[in-house]
Amino acid sequence: MILPIYIYGQPVLRKVAQPIDKDYPNLAELIQNMKETMYDSDGIGIAAPQVGVSARIVYIDVDVLKDKFPELEGKRLVLINPEVTVDENSPTESREEGCLSVPGIHENVTRHTRIHIRYFDENWQEHDEHIDGYLARVIQHECDHLEGHMFIDHISAIRKQLIRSKLNNMVKGKVDCDYRIKPYKPTKKR
Ligand code: NI
């Protein structure tokens, strides 16, 4: 089932999401809904808070970027309770990012290029991996959501000022977007 995407201004996007355990109700269904919602909105990653669920679950599919980054072919990951450590000794790189919860805004974000991650997959298999390159960026972006952070928190004050009115409009539900959304204050249908 395709769920509405919670938009900038929704309090759930600013909460620290809760770890889950194996008894978490309807986990398989939630993950399936997150996948369907992400594909419907042409995203490459989605975190549970973006569908209004404050739980530490992320889904990533970067296969679509394989022409630009061949190492991403077939990369599809469910991350449950991920613990990310950024390698502060790795080089930084600035690249454009966007977010399903911040439609129409793309900004350069500087991030380190290497991370260490521990997580459980959807079968509760534990993983312990070192990841670099573009996937490390996507994982950092998505796992930021679990801490109540968003990519626009990483941009300069000047850039933030330039998008301020767009963000304010988003909070009020004034946003153009071709997928189902749930803004904080939906505009009334006329
Ligand atoms: Ni995002």
Image (spheres, helix red, strand yellow):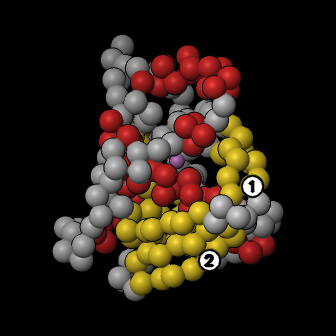
Q: Is residue 59 left or right of residue 123?
A: right
Which image quarter: residue 137?
bottom right
Residue at x 60% of width, y 59% of height: 138
Task: Write down the residue under mark 2.
Answer: 130
Q: How many marks?
A: 2
On the rendered image, what quadrant is the N terminus found in?
Answer: bottom left
Whether residue 26 is visible:
yes
Q: Count residues near mark 2 (Cα–Cα under 10 Å), then give few for <14, some for 14-19, many for 20+.
A: some
In the image, residue 135 lies at what x, y percent? 65, 65
Q: Relative to 26, does residue 137 appear above or below in the rendering?
A: above
Residue at x 75% of width, y 48% of height: 94
In the image, residue 188 lies at what x, y percent? 33, 17
**Residue at mark 2: C-beta within 8 A of ligand 1:** no
Q: Callout 2: helix, strand or loop?
A: strand
Q: Count residues near mark 1 (Cα–Cα under 10 Å), then give few for <14, some for 14-19, many for 20+.
A: some
In the image, residue 124 lies at what x, y percent? 35, 82
In the image, residue 18 lies at what x, y percent? 28, 58
Q: Earlier in the sequence, mark 1 or mark 2?
A: 1
Q: Relative to 61, does residue 121 appear above or below in the rendering?
A: below
| Numbered label attached to residue 92 | 1
Residue at x 74% of width, y 48% of height: 95
Question: Which residue sits furthest bottom?
Answer: 125
Whether residue 35 is visible:
no
**Kind of residue at badge 1:** Thr
On the rendered image, what quadrant is the C terminus found in?
Answer: top left
Q: Relative to 59, does residue 17 appear above or below in the rendering?
A: above
Which image quarter: residue 176?
top right
Question: Which residue sits furthest top?
Answer: 190
Residue at x 39% of width, y 70% of height: 80
